[in-house]
Each structure stands twice: as structure tokens, then as C-alpha cells.
Amino acid sequence: MDAAEATAGSETDGGTLSFPAGQGLRLDSGGRLEALDVAYQTYGRLNAAKTNAVLVCHALTMDQHAAGTNPATGKPGWWSRVVGPGLPLDPERYFIVCANVVGGCMGSTGPASINPRTGDPYGLAFPVITIADMVRAQAMLIAALGIETLFAVVGGSMGGMQVLQWAADYPQKLFSAVCIGAAPRHSAQNIAFHEVGRQAIMADPDWRGGAYEVAGVRPEKGLAVARMAAHITYLSEAALQRKFGRELQRDGLSWGFDADFQVESYLRHQGASFVDRFDANSYLYITRALDYFDLAAQHGGVLANAFANARGVRFCVLSFSSDWLYPTAESRDIVRALNAAGCRASFAEIETDKGHDAFFLDEPQLDATLRGFFASTAQARGL
Amino acid sequence: MDAAEATAGSETDGGTLSFPAGQGLRLDSGGRLEALDVAYQTYGRLNAAKTNAVLVCHALTMDQHAAGTNPATGKPGWWSRVVGPGLPLDPERYFIVCANVVGGCMGSTGPASINPRTGDPYGLAFPVITIADMVRAQAMLIAALGIETLFAVVGGSMGGMQVLQWAADYPQKLFSAVCIGAAPRHSAQNIAFHEVGRQAIMADPDWRGGAYEVAGVRPEKGLAVARMAAHITYLSEAALQRKFGRELQRDGLSWGFDADFQVESYLRHQGASFVDRFDANSYLYITRALDYFDLAAQHGGVLANAFANARGVRFCVLSFSSDWLYPTAESRDIVRALNAAGCRASFAEIETDKGHDAFFLDEPQLDATLRGFFASTAQARGL
């Protein structure tokens, strides 16, 4: 499906934009993806002045289905609390675009895609990609959709890092930027948790050095363990205690290694359901992109330099009080750098015990903050 | 070696106390270990009045070698900062005993021990054990060594939980009790991290349903992943940032999945060296004992009730400001319960960025606090 075909028609649309061989993606690693597919969804319509486009950037394990029903899971899109009629990002008002990141496994080119040189899935022959590579692919999509300037780029977690990268690399294409629960670089602890996940995947004999698809197997156990470890970091200790505490699955202890505690059963379920919808190599590549992310290092070690050309962009930076993966202090670093660069930035720390995952959970203060920011910014944009 | 043989002789001694079939260990699960071995080390000499004995309780992955050289690793004992000449627990003054916990893999009966019913290692036929079971085995050892009252029972992390269990089950045998960096129960987050580790081990095909020893293999990859995940929880985010930050192993990024960052290399090393010294099934059983630990639940849901008969015991409770595995709030819960029970308790939160592992690291404030507590308590004991 080409771009014109994909965006024509209904209010909710989507498809895959294919950049043919020779028009692929330049990569930070120095390499190049010869051909590039970008799978995306849109909600609403681009107005005549092309001033109402919003790019939503997704987190590590999410995809282009921010709203509507995700065909892979049958569940509502991951940001159904924010994107939809009457919600902060209302398709009646905005043309909302969300694309699967390069390296992902929901239609955009990734390690499970066919390597044109071999005819087999890339596996580990896929190049290591970066957050900037993801953003470069998004910029190609946005241009192909006929959008010169985004009303807003917005995302949480890894999506927030993409927002920062947009502000660094394409400030002239942004009217506003909303970075939620993110950080300007991955900390040692973040890298450590990701390394545990990668080692769990690679320890699974069904990983086969990354060539599991050719072998007709999948490293499901390793990927499930990786997901379980990561999932703990997405929740706060308080939320785990409130939701599960030491509640048992059954009347008494099993005196064995069954899931005695509800939190064990919950985690096992998180692991098991994840492997149904995610590709192990994509997990390796996207976590690597996150670990490599260090926006200051890209700009001479000074984070403010990343935003030197973003003085015209209206920034909103949000953090969650109980997020220990990307704590508020890291959002404050972003705000300080924006201030140092002379950018217009509003900042709020949202009080919640839900931890990092608060960005897509039932968090009325987040909804209200987004609603307020988008409403006032839309007014400034004349929408 | 019997007890008499083991404790005779030099200042540093040890051995294995074997309780023969029929004199084994009663278990909380309702079962019984028919025969029981308890491997232990001693430092110093029991005085004539038998008033100077100190029981040191070890943490999850440690063993009876609190001081001296650990024969399994060739490295100094895990508490060489605290146990030794001129140190807070000086063998010139105290008779210090440290025993490998039941379920362990350094000589005490555990899942790698021979199951007398089959002649093969127990594997998963080993019964699930509890912290109280560990303490019951220690009490058998202490009695066999001719000690009626311990001058002190002391331990950090899981060792601290054993200290609390001692105070609940054998208060009349204690003059003092020192609980460091522990909690009265495992939180949902603690259980969750342990479950990740167990799933990592069980996901390893070389685990063989626990019967890997019979098969002549070992689930090394799974155990390494379990250790890596756990190790992150032993350090603070600040300590990881201070020690490693985003420092690279080499001059530049590998653009692959080698250990680019020093923190990755460090974690991999932690995993690899752990499998050389620890048994995977012991890891399953001991983490299970920790998860089952809930001292209040053993006493009608009221933690203070656990200490109802411990009014004569002098307690010292210590926590570390950057410990997020067993945060200070949980030590405060212990102190509140001790106060409610009318016990004599001193409490200190030690300021450090070293996280949970501070209890055996270079932490002068801990050393000084222990020195002060033991000195004043020894005076009260007439030592």
C-alpha cells in the first residue's frame, strides 16, 4: 500500500509505507537499510492548512496502534485513554499519526523482516539502530504524508526520547513537543536491567544466535523472563504492594514452586502474553537503541546544545513521582537544559504511585495536564 | 567429624555436625529431614562461663565462611570487615559461630545432598524450607556446641530475618540480637524479583526439572541470569551510576550485542562467577524461604506478638538509606513492633549510597555502630 492509498478514506486509517531499495534509511551506525517499511496508523484528518498533525511515538514494546483495536491482541490501543473522541488528542481536531519504530515487529522493518541479500529474516544481520534512526524513519513518513510541520510530537518512555531526538534533529518541523516519563540518556541501572533481559533471551537455546525464525522455533522462555524482569521496573514498589501485597493464589502455600503469590502469577502472565505479541530479536535491538541513547553525548556532552535550534518549540515535560526507571530528576535535567537553551518549557511532576507505566494507565492528572497543554497550544496555533 | 572434634583445637575451626537418621530436622512444611548435616565455622573460643558465643547468620548466597579464607573461592570470608582481630566481632573476645543454612550448598543439607531414599541428589524432592527451619537447625547446632545462651545473634539481609526468627522462637537463648538491612516479611516486589530468578533457572533446559546433577549438567545460563537480575537489586542506582555510569569497555560502541558498557561487563562477570560457587536448586529453595517469610503472619498478623517473649533481649536494628530491596521503612516496622512489645531496641539508619550490599562492604559507619553496640552489650554481659 502506498502512502496516498493508506491515508485516503476513513477517519482511522493506516498501512505500510514502503521506501524501495535505494531510498532506504541512513543509519547512525554508518550503515544503511536499503529498503524501508514504516507501518503506521492515523486517526482523524489532516486539515487544509496541514497544521493539525500530531505524531505519537511509542514505547519499547508498543506499536502503531495507539487507539482503536490492536489487531494483534484484540485489545484497545495502548493510548486509548488519550487518543480518541473527547480525549486530549481528539481525532475531530487533530490528525494523529503513530508509526511502528524501525527495529520493531509490527510491520516496520526490523530483524524479523526479510533481508534482501539472503531472502531469510535478518536476525542478527540486522544493523544496530538508534533512537535517532527511529526518528529519521518517522521524518520520512511524515514528509511522505505531506506534513511539513507537526503541531506536536508526543510520547512516553522511549516515545519521550524520540520526542527529544525530534527536537534536536528536526526542530523546525515542530510546533510543540511533549516528553513524558523519559530521560535524556539511559542510566547504568537502566542498561543493567536491559542487559539482564538480553542475556535471558540469548541464554535460551531456541534463540539460535538470532536465527530462530529460519529454524522454526522461538526463544519464548528467554523472552518471557526478559519481560518479567522489565515489567517489575515499570511498576512502583507501592503499586505492587497495593495490587498484590502477599496475597496468595489459593487458600494456602503450595510448599513448592508453583505460583503461590498473586504477584508471581501476574508476572508469569505478563511474560507469557508478551511472547505472543513480540519478537525476541526486536527486543534485543530496541533495548540496545535505548541503552545507546545519550542526547548530550551527541552534542558535545552538553544537553542544552541539543536544543540550540528549538527555541521556537513549546515543550511540555512530565514525570511521575513513583517512576524509578526514569525518575523525576532526569526530567528535571531535560527542563534545565531546555531553560539553558532558551526554550519555552513547562514541567509537571504527576503525583502517582503507579510508577513508570503511569503514562498509559488511569491517571486523571496526566489526562488533565495533556488536555490543558494541547488546548492552549492549539489556540496558539490557531486550531 | 562430630561436634567435639570440630570445635577442639585452633582458634579458627569448623566442620560438619551430622544429626543421624531419626534425629533430623522438623520442618514448617509438616515434613521432616530424616538426617541433617550442618556445616559451620567458628572463630575464637567459648569462655568457661559460655557467655561469649555469637551466632552470625548469612545472607542468600553466602555461607559459613564469615571470616578467614573461603575455600570455595579463595577469597576472604564475606564478613571479614566485621569478624576478626581488632574488629567489632573479635575472636579474642567472642566465640563466633557461622553455619551454612539448611537448603544451602556449602555442606549443610540441601537439594544437592544425597536423598537417603533414592541414593541420588534430592533435587526437587527436597522439601521446601523456611527461615524458621534454618533457625531450628542453627539451634540444634548451638545446643550441640554446648551453648545455652548466645551473647548475640547477628546477620544482614536474610541473616537479619534469621535474627528476627531467633527472637521469636528462642528469645530465652538470646542476650542480644542485631538485625541489619532486613525486613519482617518479603514485599511483593521482592517476591517478583525472586520469581524472575527462579523462572530464569527453570527456563534453562539444563535444569532438567531439578535433576541436573544426575544428568551431569548444570543450568549455568539460567542461574547466571537469575544472579544478574538479583545483583541489580543489591546496589543502589546512585552506586551504579558512580561506579559505572555510561563508561564504555572500549573506545567506542560495538554496534552489536557485546558488552559495550562497563556495567554490562560487570553484571556478566557477576553471573559467571556466581555459577562457579552456587547451586541452582539451592537458589530456588532459599529464595522460596525468603518469599515465604512473614513474621507477623506467624503470630496472628501482629508483628509485635512475635517479640512478646523477647523483652529481655537487647535489640539493634540497622538499615541503609539507599537500600531499596529492604528499605528503611521496613526496619522501622520492626522497631515499632519491638517497641510495642516492650523490647529494648536501638535503631540507626546508616547514610550510604551503597544500597543493600552495604552490610558487607566498606561502610565505616556500620563498623562503628556495630563496635559500639557490641562493646556496650558486652559490658552489660560482664564480658
Image (cartoon, coloured by chain):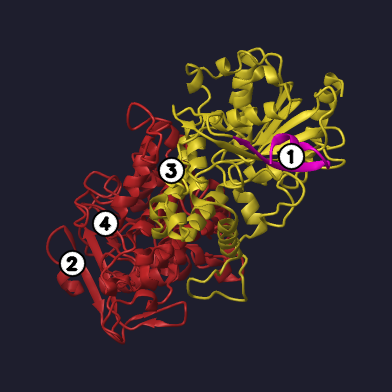
Chain colours: A yellow, B red
Q: Which mark is residue A248?
A: none
Give the distance between the C-alpha atoms of the residues marked 2 and 1, in whole angstroms. 82 Å
Q: Which amino acid does label 3 sit on?
A: Leu
Give the distance between the C-alpha atoms of the residues marked 3 and 4, in whole angstroms. 22 Å
Give the distance between the C-alpha atoms of the residues marked 4 and 1, in whole angstroms. 56 Å
**Which segment did they paint magenta?**
A1-19
Instruction: Find disc 2 in the rendering and name its residue.
Output: B7
Q: Which chain carries label 4?
A: B
Q: Quadrant of residue B189?
A: bottom right
- Percent position (x, y) of residue A346? 72, 23
Query: In the rendered structure, which disc, 3 or 4, sits on the residue that comes first in sequence?
Result: 3
Q: Which residue is drawn at 48% across and 67% down?
A: B168
Q: Which amino acid does label 1 sit on?
A: Ala
Image quadrant holding the N terminus of chain A, namely top right
Residue A147 vs B154, above or below: the answer is: above
Give the distance between the C-alpha atoms of the residues marked 2 and 3, in whole angstroms. 37 Å
Give the distance between the C-alpha atoms of the residues marked 3 and 1, in whole angstroms. 50 Å
Instruction: Find disc 4 in the rendering and name its residue.
Output: B276
**Same chain shared by disc 3 and disc 4:** yes
Q: Which chain carries label 1?
A: A
Q: Which chain carries label 2?
A: B
Observer-nearest of A315 and B9: A315
Q: Give the class, few, some or many, for how many residues have Cα within 10 Å of label 3's Cα (few <14, many ≥20).
A: many
Instruction: Find disc 3 in the rendering and name its residue.
Output: B235
Residue A274 vs A293, above or below: the answer is: below
- Percent position (x, y) of residue B17? 24, 73
- Percent position (x, y) of residue A381? 83, 20
Query: In the rendered structure, which disc, 4 or 2, sits on the residue that comes first in sequence?
Result: 2
The magenta stretch spans residue B12? no
